Amino acid sequence: MAKVLIVYVTTTGNTEKMAEAIVEGAKGAGADVTCKTVGDTKVSELGGYDVIAFGSPAMGAEVLEEAEMEPFFTDAAGSLSGKKVALFGSYDWGDGEWLRTWEDRCKEAGADVIATVKAHLEPDDDAVAECKAFGAKLA
């Protein structure tokens, strides 16, 4: 059974809704899941998990949420080498460039990016289903 950590930040609740669906999908596939906000997570915890899923909305000109996720992820990048990582988040404008940039950063850190999923604004039923399937991949 995979130990999965889902760590996210949300500004409007959209990324949180995605995280909840991902938890459901991962647990349904048999994973041992811990889900926390980035503010309640320490970088030192990452080593205890088989898979880490990071979630953040796109902000500004398609960048990570800057107050909490960006500094956390910058600190965490050094401990991602060889780790299975997944990325998710919601966006309003653009085409999801922030997620592609984030994926590149993970790969540069030596992580194995196993899945990504994005939702435009509030996740609709299709996006929630996609998040559940994403969660199952984490298991």
Image: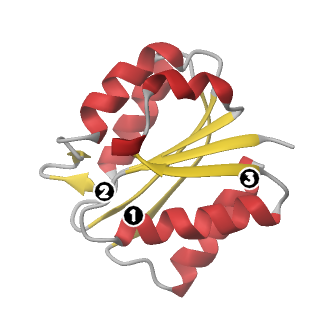
Separation of residues labelled 3 and 2 (CA atoms): 21 Å
Residue corresponding to mark 3: 137
Residue corresponding to mark 1: 15
Q: Amino acid at mark 1?
A: Thr
Give the color scheme: rainbow, by chain, secondary structure or one colour: secondary structure
Taking the spot 33% from the left edge, 31% from the top edge, the residue there is: 72
Residue corresponding to mark 2: 57
- Mark 3 lies on a secondary structure that is helix
Q: Amino acid at mark 3?
A: Lys
The picture places residue 13, in percent across and down from the top left corner, at 33, 71
In the figure, 71 relative to 62: above or below?
A: above
Separation of residues labelled 2 and 1 (CA atoms): 6 Å
Q: Are marks 2 and 1 in contact (CB under 8 Å)?
A: yes
Residue 69 found in image quarter: top left
Is residue 121 left or right of 103 when viewed as pictured?
Answer: left
Count of marks placed on residues: 3
Q: Nearer the viewer, residue 137 or 16?
A: 16
